[in-house]
Image (cartoon, grey):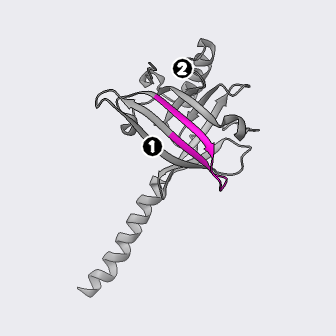
Amino acid sequence: MKTFQKIAIPVSIGVLGFILFKSCSVGIPKGATAVKNFDEDRYLGKWYEIARFDYKFEKDMDNVTATYSKNPNGTIRVDNKGYDYVKKEWKESIGEAKFVKDASEARLKVSFFKPIWAGYNVLDIDDNYQYALIVGSSLKYLWILSRTKEIPESIRQRFLEKAKKLGYNTNELIWVKHN
């Protein structure tokens, strides 16, 4: 029995560590490049979610917003809100984001359930910081954000084309209602 425990416990801990490590993926999809010369202060504030893939943590949600602000320790507070139209209730999730390297490159990691972190990469943003294309660590995660409840067709097409070139199936995007 002791021999079994000597083997089972370290193996179990190793497997658990590997699972935790894999769940903390903060990479960027192959071929993608995050925005350089990123201005963190201009990015802070309220954003409306215009489009996303269907994720279980945002299932059945409309009127989704993300508000970014500075924490006293220099990290970024992430305040996501949305209305669950099935349960007829507002939901909110507070998280924290940190830059992967430095604040001049729009590669961040975000956590809503520490110690689990996920990639948050700004791939495209207009010169006035009004519209942004965000992806996670894989082709499963994509968001289009805007400072207003709508985006111009030219920006929409620009973001969709960039996402398609990276391998995203943009036909699966959910276009979020704001009412």
Residue occupying the far bottom of the picture: 2
Q: Work out whether residue 26 can be spotted.
A: yes
Circle nearer the N terminus (1, 2): 1
Per the rendered image, the range of residues in magenta is 64-79
Residue type (three-letter) at the residue carrying disc 1:
Ser
Mark 1 near mark 2, Cβ–Cβ under 8 Å?
A: no
Q: Which residue shows up at 31% across the image and 29% down it?
A: 88
Per the picture, the main secondary structure of the magenta-coloured stretch is strand
Residue 150 is drawn in which quadrant? top right
Say which residue label 1 marks: 93
Q: Residue at point 45% right, 23% down?
A: 176
Could you say which quadrant of the image residue 53 lies in?
A: top left
Amino acid beneath label 2:
Lys
**Residue 74 among those drawn in magenta:** yes
Circle number at residue 149: 2
Residue farthest right in this picture: 37
- Report the side of 167 relative to 108 (left or right): left
